[in-house]
Amino acid sequence: MKAKFQCALCDFSRGWETIKRATEDEELRIKAAVELFRFMANEFSNEAIPAWIGSMISRLIRKVTGNPDPYREIKTRDNERALNLLPSIRAAVNSKATSYERFREACKASVIGNAAEPYILGHKYDVSSAVSLLSSEEFAIDHTQRAYSLLRGRRVILIADNAGEIAFDIVLVEQLKELGCNVVVAVKEKPVLNDATVEDAIKVGMDKVADKLITTGSDVIGLFLNAVSKDFLAELKLCDFIIAKGMGCYESITEQEIDKPVLMLFRVKCEPVAEDIGAKR
């Protein structure tokens, strides 16, 4: 997905919030803001991919402020809250009668977890609402039946998105294992916004559930094949099926040729993605 007009304000707003989180030094904040303006002026266009722009803004702010992980506190909080809810989420998934219904409910839990993303204009979230949302919300677009028919016994790579959310992904990995899948979970190599890293994955216990925990070898949001490591590409080549979490994966994967079936799981959190995919925010 290419950037739309509305993306400019969202990118700057999120960058501004990140600068505030990264440092309280007024001079550094101004310096970072100037660099943010300069980057947006030079790089933002209708040919840009929002996930790439967001990744470069995050990288720029970390460099200017010297803060390697401005969202660390938010990630810790969301991991803890999601972990407290995990038993209830698991119970709701396991209460379904059939294998397909449990898989679909696990996908829904994973999507509800994707709401855990701060500083998107017009989007608010509360991780603690996940259990009630699981019983009240339905997919806007539902391809889970088709995915289910392709998954049994396959080698799957799940590209994780946010901290907190990754705890809810555990129930999806459990259901994939019930289908006889070998499941590789990929997280970010280094911090970017509130995306999950190995530290976050281990905190919620994903390393004990997945067959293998790896990184993309990158700090780039979504999936850009030109920005990941050779090790990740080797794992991607071995897999039969990709489950990609988050709007960043939607924005990036739709602009590339991927020779594997991909199930994208995400919550529509902004108007540009809503318009592009044909679902309500």
Image (tube, rainbow, N blue to C red):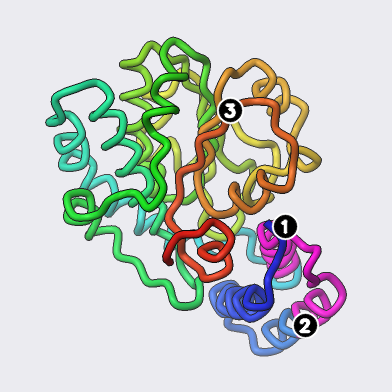
Residue hosting label 3: 261
Residue 94 position in % (x across, y down)? 17, 29
Q: Is residue 11 visible?
A: yes
Residue hosting label 1: 52
Residue, x 54% and y 56% (percent of image)? 277
Q: Which of pointers 1 and 3 lies earlier in the amino acid sequence?
A: 1
Q: Amino acid at mark 1?
A: Trp
Of badges 1 and 3, the one in the foreground is: 3
- Asked if the residue at tag 3 contacts the one at tag 1, i.e. Cβ–Cβ closer than 8 Å, the answer is no
Residue 212 position in % (x across, y down)? 51, 21
Q: Is residue 164 visible?
A: no
Q: Which of pointers 3 and 2 lies earlier in the amino acid sequence?
A: 2
Q: Is residue 177 left or right of residue 200?
A: left
Q: Which mark is residue 37?
A: 2
Give how far apart the Cα atoms at labels 3 and 2 are: 38 Å
Magenta residues, start to end:
34-62
Q: Residues within 10 Å of mark 1 (few under 14, many from 20)?
A: some
Residue 263 position in % (x across, y down)? 50, 35
